[in-house]
Image: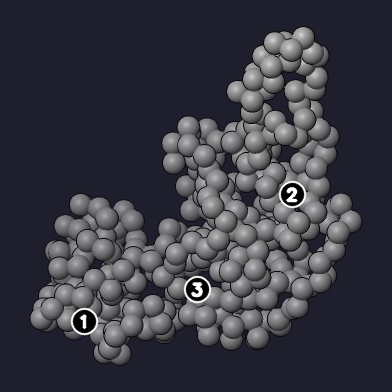
């Protein structure tokens, strides 16, 4: 996203290869005094719900989601791209019936793009109208002149929202410092209006690809979890759920190949999202008549996104795809 574009995404779900359903956490009270008491699933019920919805979380991730919801803490998810971090916020919004508000981070993101801006054209028009009528201009810093960005929209949501702060590691350190009040107390201070507190405590998910180290002050305000690449059985289950028509033998061969690929010294190891797309592409080619190992090689551009990595894989093609 370019700095000149709005970082706001429309409310609702993000399309994902998988998904899961969870119930929100236990009773909590916002700094403003409003309370919510949604139903709470224990960890085993949560894991079963996730699996029924097609998202195969391991025990550590289930525990992290469970505690974040129960304690009403922001959830910070780190891991390599494509391991399923963003989907957590997406599916939570769908299951709990709350809008998803997405703040996509980028270098140079500032408070005005994340929190609020004043509508200067509207303010200028107010000045001109007042002058033309010989009236006093009045207060130009009223709420009617306020442009609400993702953080402020989250705080003002009467039903509570799911806020996704995506790729926080792409933002600057100064933006991390700005977030501390919001993450710690679900409130923010606007000089012209005062302190605005959440009407209903939001569910906040932050993601990071760890392109840089995040500050301890931000981490202290969150519940932290690292999402690793899935083990063989879990990735096979993910593929079967996400790719209709994928035969069991093909799924086993593809997962073996992906696991071997990740063991090579690649510039970018493929995540779950890439393995799902590779399976879909190879399945389409196989349905068109290509033998399965040939289909895997032809669809390699869905798994690997770098020329050097592609050359490296082709040099190991026999050992990677020979028994796939």
Calculate the distance from the C-alpha at mark 1 to the C-alpha at mark 2: 52 Å
- Quarter of the figure that contains the N terminus: top left
Can you identify the residue that label 2 sits on? Answer: 156
- Number of other residues with Cα within 10 Å of mark 3, as a class: few under 14, some 14 to 19, many 20 or more: many
In front of the other: 56 or 11? 11
Do the numbered discs 1 and 2 sit on residues whose CB atoms are within 8 Å?
A: no
Which residue is found at the position 67% from the left and 58% from the top? 161
Calculate the distance from the C-alpha at mark 3 to the C-alpha at mark 1: 27 Å
Q: Nearer the viewer, mark 3 or mark 1?
A: 3
Q: Nearer the viewer, mark 1 or mark 2?
A: 2
In this picture, residue 218 sits left or right of residue 104: right
- Which residue lies most toward the front here? 133
Q: Quadrant of residue 248?
A: bottom left
Can you identify the residue that label 3 sits on? Answer: 19
Label 1 residue SS: loop
Can you identify the residue that label 1 sits on? Answer: 324
Do the numbered discs 3 and 1 sit on residues whose CB atoms are within 8 Å?
A: no
- The mark that comes first in sequence, 1 or 2, is 2
């Amino acid at each position: 996203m370019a700095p000149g574009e709005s970082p706001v995404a429309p409310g609702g779900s993000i399309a994902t290869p998988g998904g899961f359903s969870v119930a929100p956490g236990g009773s909590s009270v916002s700094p403003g005094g409003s309370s919510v008491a949604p139903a709470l699933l224990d960890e085993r019920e949560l894991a079963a719900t996730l699996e029924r919805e097609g998202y195969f979380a391991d025990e550590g991730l289930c525990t992290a989601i469970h505690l974040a919801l129960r304690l009403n803490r922001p959830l910070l998810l780190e891991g390599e791209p494509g391991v399923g971090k963003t989907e957590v916020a997406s599916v939570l919004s769908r299951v709990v019936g709350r809008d998803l508000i997405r703040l996509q981070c980028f270098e140079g993101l500032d408070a005005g793009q994340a929190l609020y801006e004043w509508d200067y054209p509207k303010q200028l028009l107010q000045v001109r109208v007042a002058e033309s009528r010989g009236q006093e201009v009045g207060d130009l810093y009223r709420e009617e002149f306020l442009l609400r960005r993702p953080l402020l929209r989250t705080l003002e949501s009467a039903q509570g929202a799911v806020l996704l702060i995506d790729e926080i590691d792409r933002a600057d350190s100064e933006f991390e410092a700005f977030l501390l009040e919001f993450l710690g107390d679900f409130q923010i201070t606007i000089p012209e209006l005062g302190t605005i507190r959440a009407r209903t405590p939001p569910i906040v998910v932050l993601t990071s690809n760890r392109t840089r180290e995040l500050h301890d002050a931000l981490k202290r305000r969150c519940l932290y979890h690292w999402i690793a690449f899935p083990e063989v059985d879990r990735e096979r289950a993910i593929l079967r759920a996400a790719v209709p028509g994928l035969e069991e033998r093909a799924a086993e061969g593809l997962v073996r190949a992906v696991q071997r690929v990740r063991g090579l010294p690649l510039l970018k190891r493929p995540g779950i999202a890439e393995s799902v797309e590779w399976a879909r592409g190879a399945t389409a080619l196989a349905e068109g008549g290509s033998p399965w190992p040939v289909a895997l090689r032809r669809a390699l551009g869905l798994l690997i996104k770098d020329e050097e990595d592609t050359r490296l894989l082709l040099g190991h093609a026999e050992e990677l795809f020979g028994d796939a």
